[in-house]
Image (cartoon, rainbow, N blue to C red):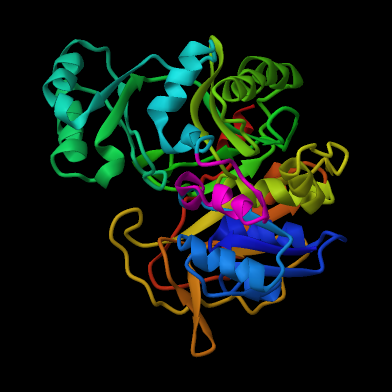
Amino acid sequence: MKVAVLGSGGREHALALKISESPSLSELFILPGNPGTKKLGHNIQIDINNFSSVINFCKTNSIDFVVVGPEQPLVNGIIDELKKNGIVAFGPSKNAARLEGEKSFAKQLMIENSIPTAAFNVFQKDNYSQAVEYLKSTKYPVVIKADGLAAGKGVVIVNSFNEAKKEISNYFDKSLFGKAGEKIIIEEFMEGEEVSVFAITDGVDYVLLPTAQDHKKIGEGDAGKNTGGMGAYSPTPFVSNAVLEQIKRSIIEPTLFAMQKVGSKFSGCLYCGLMLTSDGPKVVEFNSRFGDPETQVVLPLIEGDFLKLLYSSSTGKIDKDSVKFSNGACVGVVLASKGYPEHYEKGYKIYGLDQDFDNDVIIFHAGTKESNGEIITNGGRVLNVIVKSKNNDLTYCKKRCYEVIQTIYFDGMYYRKDISDKAFKH
C-alpha cells in the first residue's frame, strides 16, 4: 500500500514512524514532512492546505491511502475532497470536524445528548455588552475559549471580572485569535485531573488507544500561558478500567451516536480531552485528529498493524484485532524555542542529534528544517524527546528522558522539568 501522511510536526513524525512498521506498506510519502520523517519515506514539499496540489500528487503517484495529521485541513474539508476523487483517507468529513472547528457546535451537541461537560454560554463579537453583563454575575474562576481553531492557545482561565473583561477585549477588540475568536465560549471552571483519550472509529465501532496526559502550560506547575503542549506521558495511572468504561458509556458512544443522528457520522480519530471531576468524567473539548504531543507517547505503546487499523476504520469496518497494547509506558518532553508560545526566533543549529540513542529513546522532529546539511530550529516546539519502558516504569522514563535532554542543545532551548510528575501522585 502506498501511503501519504499530511503534516510536518512531531505528531506526523510519530504517525509516519508507526505506519512505516506495517507489513502492508509498500511506499511512504510525507507532505511536507521534516528532517526526521526524511529517514522514513519521501518528503514532498507541498502545501497541504492547497487541496488541488495534494489531490494531483495522490493521483499522479497512485496513493492508496492518505492520513491527515493537522486539524486545519480537516476542518476545511480535505477528507471530502479526497473522497470525491476516489482517494481513501483517514479523518472526519468537514461537517464531522465541526466537533473541533466549532466549539459551540460541540457544546450544543453535548447538551442535547446528555454528554457530561461544563456549563457554558456563547457570545458573538457583537454581543460584547451582554458578555460583560454575564461576567459581572458569574462565579469565578471561569474559562474563556475561542470558538474556532487557535492552535491550542485560544483558552484562558480568569479569576476576576476585571481580568475576564480584559481577556474578552483581546478576543473581540484586539482580534488576538482572528476569526476564531469572533465567537467565544464562557464556561464553568472544572476541577480534577485531565486526561486525553483517543478513539479510532469507523463512526459506529471503535478502538481506544492508551490514555495520556498533556501538559498545556508553558511553565512548571502548570503556570503561565497555554501552549500547544509541552510534554505528555502514557498511560495515566489514575484512569481505572471502571473509569474507562464510564468514559465509553457516557461520552464516546453517545457522541458517535449523536453525530450519526445529525447526519455527520464521525470516522477517524475522536480525541476526547476530559476532566475527571468529583462528579465523574466530563468533556473539556473534542478534537477531530490525533493530539500533539500525546500521539508521540501513545503510538510507541501500540503493537500490531497500525496502518491496518487506520485503513479499516476509513473503509467502513474497523479491524479491532489489528493492534494490541504493550504493558509499557512513555514520557515525552517538548524542547521549545525561547519565547514560545509568543515571539521566538528560528534558525539556530541543533546539536546532539547525530548520536546513537538507545532503543528506548526516540527523537521526534516538530519544528526543524535542514539547511546546508545542518538541522536548525524552525518553530516554537522544536523536538520531542521520548523514552519508552517495556514494563510500565514511568520513573525510569522520566529520569532517562531528562538525561537525554542534557545531550541536546540549541540556543534558547527551553523545556519543562516536571513532565509526568502528576502521575506519581497516584
Tell whether 262 sits left or right of 306. left
Task: Measuring from the top left, give residue 277's x and y in whole percent.
Answer: 52, 16
Residue 320 relative to residue 275: left or right: right
In this view of the protein, which residue sits in the foreground, 277 or 58? Answer: 58
Relative to 126, say whether 254 is above or below: above
Q: Is residue 176 above or below residue 183?
A: below
Image point (62%, 56%), residue name:
85
Q: How many marks?
A: 0
Quadrant housing the N terminus: bottom right
Position of residue 352 relative to residue 131, above or below, is below
Residue 169 falls in which quadrant of the image? Answer: top left
Report whether residue 175 is seen.
yes
Q: Please provide percent x and percent y for residue 214.
A: 54, 40
Q: Residue at x 81, y 50 (%)?
A: 308
In the drawing, does residue 78 fall left or right of residue 138?
Answer: right
175 up-or-down from 277: above or below = below
Closer to the camera, 177 or 193? 177
Q: Residue furthest bottom?
A: 372
Q: Does the magenta stretch include residue 92?
A: yes
Residue 55 x %, y %: 58, 64
Instruction: Give the camera-side residue of 282 and 173.
Output: 173
Magenta-tinted stretch: 73-94
Quadrant showing the C terminus: top right
- Pick the front one: 24 or 345: 24
Image quadrant in which you'd find residue 274:
top right
Q: Position of residue 394 (x, y in %)?
A: 70, 43
Residue at 43%, 70% in the rendered image? 378
Q: Which residue is drawn at 29% across and 30% down?
A: 184
Q: Is residue 25 magenta?
A: no
Residue 32 visible in the picture: no
